[in-house]
């Protein structure tokens, strides 16, 4: 079995402790495992033995995804890297266990389908559709603590696979790694619903699953043998977040070791050297569709940050899929609510698309946090009053159905 590099631990001091916008906040693993590196953003479960038992259990369970499904998605992403397909990746910032219900999952799938149908109709191109779905249960956090609305300082929510969203000090303890098994069970039932939605559709017209490959004691035991090496059977597509993409980190090493198509987030501080090094590391053979860069620079940073990165990747010659995540660089707090303005989101999409087009590269698509529900989590614009009457997200604010359709339409108008 692929062992999590978390055990045994010699330094448990600070994985939750400091600003995780650097890559150096994680645990340092010294076990005789497959690799020896920094493992950022891992929960500090009180009982390390229990983590080991859960890992053993996960290793014995059925793979959640099949290699041929993963390969079908990779073929679609290969087309997208060549400018012959678009990509829509979207869904909740954090899924919640209580939402792993057939009817709710079906609504999410239908919403993704309708957004990608609009992209297909407008461009006549195939659209690769990927949900933030069936495993988006672990969240990286910039701060180890957060303030409740009543003014209590409690541990941050790290996703249902780690602790409870309920804002009180007791339930925020990363109580038990058994939550990882619940994550597996929920992901399994969601994947059943995803497959039901496929019926006899062409592989390029299906919704696939994806999540951030964050929690190593979940990801490592779910690696399975495939025909070309090992693949992550926890999902179809996994991405590495902005906080865990360090070149010396365990997450990049994990992504390197599996054959799935993988994504890497690139934030405002990503350099051309970072991007080229990541591409060489994860995709040494330059396989089309293997690597997706998900750019989340923030509206004011796209021009300066992205143009040199795109040029460097083009000069290096290895293909990538370029996606715009206009969500994670544009957050702010309004009346105590985390929010984002649709105008900034559209502004970032516009800047991203123009930079790619100026460099004669293909802006392949969007990575959104969205929901079919009529929530009021994202505001129309940064100025003006807003009442957050229907705010349900357990993590970042999502575009509602109408707002997501508007962002997609604005992107399509630029192609
Ligand atoms: C996310 O996609 O929810 C996320 C945490 O993104 P990032 O790593 O880009 O901050
Ligand atoms: Co988010």
Image (cartoon, rainbow, N blue to C red):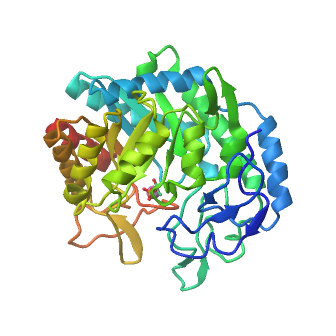
Please state which of residues 311 and 332 is positioned toward the viewer in this rendering: 311
Which residue appears at 41% of the width and 72% of the height?
337
| Residue sitting at x 33%, y 29% | 80
Q: Which of 407 and 9 is in front in this view?
A: 9
Quadrant (top left/top right/bottom left/bottom right) for the N terminus? top right
Q: Which of 301 and 27 is in front in this view?
A: 27
Q: Is residue 240 left or right of residue 328?
A: right
Q: For the image shown, how many numbered marks are present on the structure? A: 0
Q: In terms of image quadrants, where is residue 150?
A: bottom right
Residue 76 in the image: state x and y as whole percent.
40, 24
Q: Is 411 placed left or right of 285 in the picture?
A: left
Give the quadrant of ligand 2: bottom left
Identify which residue, 302 or 381, lies in the foreground.
Answer: 302
Estimate the x, y position of residue 87 in percent, counting from the top left.
35, 34
* Residue 70 visible at all: yes
Q: Quadrant of the C terminus?
A: top left
Relative to 222, is 170 above or below?
below
Residue 222 image position (x, y, % from top left): 70, 38
Q: Where is residue 17 in the image (x, y as percent from the top left)?
A: 60, 76
The picture quadrant where one finds residue 233 is top right
Q: Residue furthest bottom?
A: 151
Task: Kindly tell me whether residue 90 is visible in this rendering.
Answer: no
């Amino acid at each position: 079995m692929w062992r999590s590099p978390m055990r045994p631990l010699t330094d448990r001091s600070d994985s939750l402790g400091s600003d995780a916008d650097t890559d150096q906040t994680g645990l340092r693993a010294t076990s005789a495992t497959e690799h020896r590196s920094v493992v950022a953003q891992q929960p500090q479960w009180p009982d390390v033995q229990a983590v080991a038992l859960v890992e053993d259990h996960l290793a014995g369970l059925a793979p959640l995804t099949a290699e041929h499904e993963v390969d079908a998605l990779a073929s679609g992403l290969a087309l997208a890297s060549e400018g012959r397909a678009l990509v829509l990746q979207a869904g909740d910032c954090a899924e919640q266990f209580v939402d792993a219900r057939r009817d709710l999952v079906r609504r999410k799938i239908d919403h993704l389908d309708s957004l990608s149908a609009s992209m297909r109709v407008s461009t006549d191109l195939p659209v690769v559709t990927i949900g933030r779905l069936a495993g988006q249960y672990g969240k990286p956090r910039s701060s180890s603590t957060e303030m409740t609305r009543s003014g209590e300082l409690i541990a941050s929510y790290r996703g249902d696979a780690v602790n409870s969203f309920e804002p009180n000090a007791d339930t925020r303890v990363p109580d038990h790694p058994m939550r990882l098994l619940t994550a597996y069970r929920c992901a399994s039932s969601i994947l059943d619903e995803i497959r039901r939605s496929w019926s006899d559709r062409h592989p390029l017209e299906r919704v696939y699953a994806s999540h951030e490959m964050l929690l190593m004691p979940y990801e490592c035991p779910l690696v399975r043998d495939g025909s070309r090496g090992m693949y992550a059977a926890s999902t179809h597509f996994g991405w590495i977040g902005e906080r865990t993409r360090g070149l010396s980190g365990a997450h990049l090493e994990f992504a390197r070791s599996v054959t799935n198509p993988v994504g890497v987030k690139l934030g405002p501080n990503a350099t051309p050297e970072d991007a080229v090094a990541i591409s060489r590391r994860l995709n040494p053979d330059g396989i089309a569709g293997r690597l997706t860069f998900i750019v989340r620079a923030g509206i004011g940073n796209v021009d300066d940050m992205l143009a040199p990165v795109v040029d460097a990747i083009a000069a290096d010659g290895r293909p990538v899929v370029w996606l715009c995540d206009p969500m994670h660089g544009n957050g702010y707090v309004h009346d105590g609510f985390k929010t984002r303005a649709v105008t900034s989101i559209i502004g970032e999409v516009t800047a991203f698309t123009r930079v790619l087009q100026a460099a004669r590269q293909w802006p392949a698509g969007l990575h959104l946090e969205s929901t079919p529900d009529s929530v009021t989590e994202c505001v129309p614009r940064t100025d003006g009053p807003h009442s957050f009457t229907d705010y349900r997200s357990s993590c970042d604010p999502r575009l509602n159905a109408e707002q997501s359709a508007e962002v997609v339409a604005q992107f399509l108008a630029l192609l």
